[in-house]
C-alpha cells in the first residue's frame, strides 16, 4: 500500500495537513515563551491541539453533502446557544461569552464561524447562483442575527469574523455589483447605530486611540504602544527565543493570546515572522487550489470562504498588533492560546479535506 492510498483512505490532504502541523508545532514553542514557561498552560495547549486534530480527522470522514443537508440544524442550534449565553452565561470582566456545563466550558460564538457560512451556502443553493436581490436581503438577515448576538456579548472581534465569513460567501457566489453596493450602503448606514448603541466605551476608545496612542499611554494606548515596541525591537533576527524583554518582563499584555505575534516579532525577528507567514501562505494557496478543484459550487464556495476568512483572521490580528488596525480581540489563528477558536478552525480544515478527498474517491468510482 503506497502513501497516497493511506492518505486517501483517511480522507486527509497531506499537503494541507503538513502546513497545519508545522504551524501547530511552531505555536507550542511560542506559547512556551509567551506564557512565561507555564507548564499548566503548555499542557492545556497540547490537549487543545490533540482535540483539534481529532476533530479535523473526524470531520474529514463526513461526506460534503452531509454538511450541506444539516446546515440549517447547525445554524438553529448555534442561535439557541447564543441566546442561552445571553440568558445564563457567566459574566467575566464585563463580558458574557461562555456557557459552563458540568463537564464542558465553551464559547458558542466560535461555532457561528462555521454555522453561518454553511447556512448561507445552503440557502443560496436552494435559490440560484448568483443570488437574486431578494435572496441577498434574506442572506444579510441570516448573517446579521448571530453577528448581533455576538457583538452584544460584547465580542466585536468574533462578530466581525462571523460577518466576514458570511459576506465572503455572498461575494464568491457571484453577487452583482448592484447588490454589493447596496450591501455596503446598508453596512455604512448601520455603523452609527453600532457606534452609539452596541459598542462599549472601551471599544470606542480603542478605535479613537488608534490614531494617537500617546494621548493615553498608560490606559487605552498601552496595548498598542507596548506591542509596537516589542515587535519593532526584534529587528531582523530577534533577541532570541525566551529572551524577549517586553514579553518576559510582562510589559506586553495578553501576550499568549491576542498579542502573541508581538512575542514572535521580538524574539525571532523578521525571520521568524517571515517563516510564519510562509506557513500561512502555504495553507491559503493549498486551500484555494482545493476550492478550484472542487466538483460542485458548494465545495468551491465554502472552501473559498473558509480560506478567505483565515486570511482576514491573520490580517486583522497582525494589523491590530502592529498598530494599523484597532484592537478588536482577535487571536492569531492556530498560534494563540485558546481552545474554542483552535478547535473550530481545525473543524473548518476537516471540512475542506472532506470536500477535496471525497472528490478524489468519487472520481475513482466513476
Image: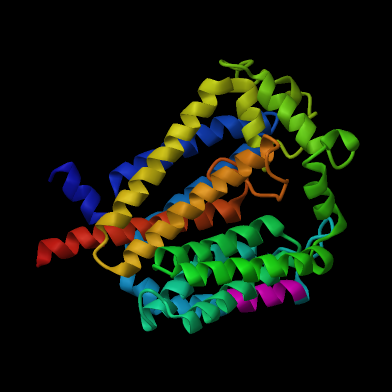
The residue closer to the viewer here, 319 or 261, is 319
What is the image's colouring?
A: rainbow
Question: Is residue 247 positioned above or below 323 on the image?
Answer: above
- Please give the range of residues in magenta: 77-86
The residue closer to the viewer here, 87 or 176, is 176
Q: Residue furthest left?
A: 366
The reply to whether the magenta stretch includes residue 171 is: no
Quadrant location, the C terminus:
bottom left
Looking at the picture, how far across and down is residue 75, in whole percent? 53, 76
Left or right: 184, with 13 as reference point: right
Looking at the picture, how far across and down is residue 331, in whole percent? 63, 46
Q: Residue at x 56, y 75 (%)?
A: 140
Most prominent secondary structure in the magenta stretch? Answer: helix
Q: Residue at x 49, y 71 (%)?
A: 178
Left or right: 187, with 237 as reference point: right
Looking at the picture, how far across and down is residue 62, in whole percent? 33, 67
Q: Residue at x 78, y 66 (%)?
A: 192
Q: Residue at x 67, y 26 (%)?
A: 231
Question: Is residue 50 positioned above or below 215 on the image?
Answer: below
Disc count in the image? 0
Looking at the rendering, which quadrant does residue 42 occupy?
top right
Left or right: 100, with 216 as reference point: left
Looking at the picture, how far across and down is residue 25, in whole percent? 48, 34
Amino acid at each position: 500500500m503506497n502513501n497516497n492510498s493511506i492518505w486517501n483512505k483517511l480522507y486527509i490532504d497531506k499537503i494541507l495537513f503538513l502546513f497545519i502541523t508545522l504551524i501547530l508545532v511552531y505555536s507550542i514553542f511560542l506559547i512556551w515563551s509567551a506564557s512565561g514557561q507555564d507548564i499548566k498552560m503548555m499542557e492545556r495547549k497540547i490537549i487543545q491541539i490533540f482535540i483539534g486534530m481529532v476533530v479535523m480527522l473526524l470531520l474529514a470522514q463526513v461526506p460534503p453533502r452531509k454538511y450541506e443537508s444539516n446546515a440549517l440544524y447547525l445554524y438553529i442550534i448555534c442561535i439557541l446557544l447564543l441566546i442561552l449565553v445571553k440568558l445564563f452565561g457567566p459574566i467575566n470582566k464585563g463580558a458574557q461569552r461562555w456557557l459552563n456545563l458540568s463537564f464542558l466550558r465553551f464559547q458558542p460564538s466560535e461555532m457561528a464561524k462555521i454555522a453561518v457560512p454553511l447556512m448561507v451556502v445552503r440557502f443560496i443553493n436552494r435559490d440560484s447562483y448568483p443570488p437574486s436581490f431578494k435572496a441577498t436581503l434574506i442572506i444579510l438577515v441570516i448573517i446579521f442575527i448571530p453577528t448581533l448576538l455576538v457583538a452584544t456579548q460584547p465580542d466585536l472581534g468574533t462578530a466581525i469574523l462571523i460577518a466576514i465569513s458570511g459576506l465572503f460567501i455572498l461575494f464568491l457566489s457571484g453577487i452583482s455589483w448592484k447588490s454589493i453596493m447596496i450591501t455596503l450602503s446598508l453596512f455604512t448606514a448601520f455603523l452609527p447605530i453600532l457606534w452609539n448603541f452596541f459598542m462599549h466605551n472601551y471599544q470606542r476608545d480603542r478605535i479613537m486611540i488608534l490614531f494617537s496612542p500617546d494621548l493615553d499611554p498608560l490606559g487605552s494606548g498601552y496595548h498598542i504602544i507596548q506591542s509596537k515596541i516589542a515587535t519593532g525591537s526584534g529587528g531582523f533576527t530577534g533577541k532570541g527565543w525566551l529572551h524577549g524583554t517586553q514579553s518576559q518582563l510582562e510589559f506586553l499584555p495578553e501576550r499568549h493570546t491576542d498579542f502573541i505575534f508581538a512575542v514572535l516579532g521580538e524574539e525571532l525577528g523578521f525571520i521568524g515572522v517571515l517563516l510564519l507567514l510562509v506557513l500561512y501562505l502555504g495553507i491559503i494557496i493549498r486551500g484555494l487550489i482545493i476550492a478550484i478543484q472542487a466538483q460542485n459550487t458548494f465545495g468551491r464556495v465554502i472552501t473559498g470562504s473558509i480560506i478567505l476568512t483565515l486570511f482576514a483572521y491573520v490580517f486583522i490580528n497582525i494589523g491590530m498588533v502592529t498598530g494599523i488596525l484597532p484592537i478588536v480581540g482577535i487571536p492569531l489563528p492556530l498560534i494563540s492560546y485558546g481552545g474554542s477558536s483552535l478547535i473550530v478552525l481545525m473543524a473548518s480544515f476537516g471540512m475542506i479535506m472532506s470536500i477535496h478527498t471525497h472528490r478524489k474517491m468519487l472520481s475513482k468510482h466513476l
